[in-house]
Image (cartoon, rainbow, N blue to C red):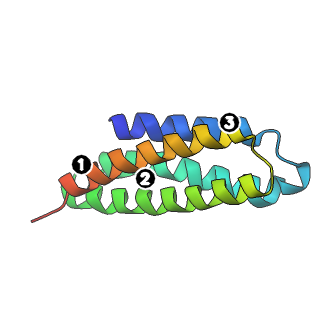
């Protein structure tokens, strides 16, 4: 799924860019942002593996929630100056793309 591929890329970039966050944030914002970013892709995978349209729809909704959390944490981290402007813009652009794709997929799986 393209939604998973893009979400996976987002998680990979988050892991890469957070590797230089301050050490005192290891169990704070670094951990939280990594878990939220990874959760987007994980929920797509788990929902798809259920092989049930209703379940897939539910997990896509959870993935959208995780994406919203990720976007907030990206902004918060940028305001703390943990990201360069280029890193932040790259992550935001990708998260917006993931959001658009994920939303369309979510709507297409809605049960009648």
Left or right, residue 72 beside residue 68 = right
Label 3: state its secondary structure.
Answer: helix
Nearer to us: label 1 or label 3: 3
Mark 3 sits on what residue? 86
Distance in Å between CA atoms under marks 3 and 2: 28 Å
Mark 1 sits on what residue? 51
Q: Residue at x 82, y 53 (%)?
A: 26
Q: Earlier in the sequence, mark 2 or mark 1?
A: 2
Out of 75 and 39, give the one closest to the viewer. Answer: 75
Nearer to us: label 2 or label 1: 2
Q: Earlier in the sequence, mark 1 or mark 3?
A: 1
Q: Residue at x 50, y 37 (%)?
A: 8
Looking at the figure, which quarter contains the N terminus? top left
Mark 2 sits on what residue? 43
Q: Residue at x 88, y 49 (%)?
A: 22
Q: Is residue 18 above or below residue 28?
A: above
Q: Which mark is residue 22?
A: none
Nearer to us: label 3 or label 2: 3
Out of 71 and 42, give the one closest to the viewer. Answer: 71
Q: Residue at x 35, y 48 (%)?
A: 100
Q: Earlier in the sequence, mark 3 or mark 2?
A: 2
């Amino acid at each position: 799924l393209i939604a998973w591929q893009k979400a996976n890329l987002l998680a990979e970039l988050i892991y890469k860019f957070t590797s230089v966050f301050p050490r005192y944030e290891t169990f704070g914002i670094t951990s939280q942002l990594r878990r939220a970013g990874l959760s987007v892709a994980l929920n797509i995978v788990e929902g798809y593996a259920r092989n049930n349209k209703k379940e897939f729809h539910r997990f896509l909704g959870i993935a959208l929630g995780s994406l919203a959390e990720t976007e907030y944490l990206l902004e918060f981290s940028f305001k703390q100056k943990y990201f360069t402007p280029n890193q932040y813009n790259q992550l935001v652009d990708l998260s917006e793309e993931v959001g658009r794709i994920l939303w369309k997929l979510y709507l297409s799986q809605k049960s009648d």
